[in-house]
Image (cartoon, rainbow, N blue to C red):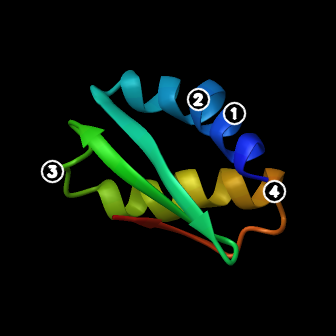
Amino acid sequence: MEEQVKAILENEIKPALAADGGSIEFVGIEDGVVKVRLQGACAGCPGAAMTMKMGVERILKEKVPEIKEVIAV
């Protein structure tokens, strides 16, 4: 599951965030909770929480149903 999450982050989510000057780093996964770190413009963006829930979490849950939640650390 970890490799699948990393591939989705790298190939689908990172390019979208990069278009707005941001990035995302995989930190780990534990009990279905994916931990990521937002970087670049995303790190201080007021819309980052919305990006996490409506973007990153939604995409990962669609593609990997075992994921329960995505959190920023």
Q: Judge whether 5 appears above or below 57 on screen.
A: above
The residue type indicated by label 3 comes to Gly
Which residue is pictured at 64% across the width and 39% down the height? 6
Residue 2, image x, y percentages: 71, 50
| Quarter location, residue 54 | bottom right
Q: Which residue is mark 3?
A: 44
Which residue is pictured at 40% across the width and 61% down the height? 50
Q: Going from the N terminus, do you reach mark 3 or mark 4 first?
A: 3
Q: Mark 3, mark 4: which one is toward the viewer?
A: 4
For mark 1, give the secondary structure.
helix
Q: Judge whether 68 appears above or below 6 on screen.
A: below
Residue 51, image x, y percentages: 43, 54
Q: Going from the N terminus, do you reach mark 4 or mark 1 first?
A: 1
Q: Mark 2, mark 3: which one is toward the viewer?
A: 2
Q: Are marks 3 and 4 in contact (CB under 8 Å)?
A: no
Which residue is pictured at 27% across the width and 26% down the height? 21
Question: Left or right of 43: which side holds 59?
Answer: right
Nearest the camera: 8 or 27? 27
Q: Which residue is mark 1?
A: 7
The residue type indicated by label 4 comes to Val
Q: Are marks 2 and 3 in contact (CB under 8 Å)?
A: no
Residue 56, image x, y percentages: 55, 52
Crowdedness of circle 1 by 10 Å Cα count: few (<14), some, many (20+)? few
For the C terminus, give its image quadrant: bottom left
For mark 3, give the secondary structure.
loop
For mark 4, give the secondary structure.
loop
Instruction: Identify the disc placed on residue 10.
Output: 2
Residue 10, image x, y percentages: 58, 29
Report the Cα–Cα distance between label 3 and label 4: 28 Å
Q: Going from the N terminus, do you reach mark 1 or mark 3 first?
A: 1
Nearest the camera: 30 or 40? 30
For mark 2, give the secondary structure.
helix
